[in-house]
Amino acid sequence: MIVQDIFLTETAQDADIILPALCYMEKQGTFINIARQSFSIHPGKIIPKYLFSDGEIFKKIGEKIGVSLPNPPDLTMHSYVEKEKMEITIPKNQESAATKFISVFSKPLFNRAVRMKHNKHLSQMATIPPVRIHPEAAEELGISDGNMVSIKGEKGSMLCSLSYDSGIAKKVIVIPLGFPQDIPVQELQAYAMNGLPVEVEKI
């Protein structure tokens, strides 16, 4: 058994081989979310030269067994997304007359959730953001930038303003959290979970 962990856990103590790992504060690289957006992460401290990233560890193992792997800096999602132009698709059995989208819930830095209400200054800085979809997907539905739309989930529906965002996949809709009165996501589903299929219609 091979275990990779930052602690010598009970499982690690039973392992035949233990590989070290970096904690989240030490990692560097990129990751991609369901909306096809890639983000960079940077270490919060200087990493000693004797500590290696996951990519560096596997590259060194590969060298020992005669397998050539690309250098860790080449394994970036930024370049992958640009080359592959990843798309989100909806299963055919979930399609309907109104085009369905996969929802992604995102909380802006400044919002009007419970914690923000304790600071009136920060609460005043929170402007109501629109939901966002790809321009081509919106045009297929006859929706213009700034139109009001109806979003229907498995539980109910809500009305909100919509804006274009060419940086997300065509079958994805980004819905802001933290605005319960203006963007009542609780009307769509009991819990705001990424991947919820929703229908979008112009009103």
Image (tube, rainbow, N blue to C red):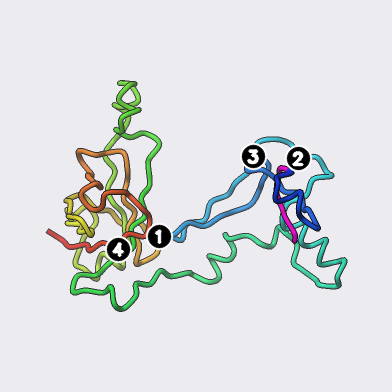
N-terminal-most mark, 4 or 1: 1
| Circle 1 residues within 10 Å: few <14, some 14–19, many ≥20 | many
* Depicted 25 relative to depicted 63: above or below: above
The stretch of residues the image draws in magenta is 1-7
Residue matched to label 2: 47
| 119 sits left or right of 20 in the view | left
Q: Secondary structure at mark 1?
A: loop
Quarter holding the N terminus? bottom right
Give the image location of residue 67, x and y in percent: 81, 72
Residue matched to label 3: 25
N-terminal-most mark, 2 or 1: 2
Q: Are marks 1 and 3 in contact (CB under 8 Å)?
A: no
Give the image location of residue 172, x and y in percent: 35, 62
Q: Residue furthest left?
A: 203
Camera-near label (2 vs 1) is 2
Residue matched to label 4: 197
Q: Are marks 4 and 2 in contact (CB under 8 Å)?
A: no
Amino acid residing under circle 1: Ile
| 37 sits left or right of 141 in the view | right
* Front one among 8 and 117: 8
Q: Are marks 3 and 2 in contact (CB under 8 Å)?
A: no
N-terminal-most mark, 1 or 3: 3
Alpha carbon separation for disc pair 2 and 1: 33 Å
Residue matched to label 1: 168
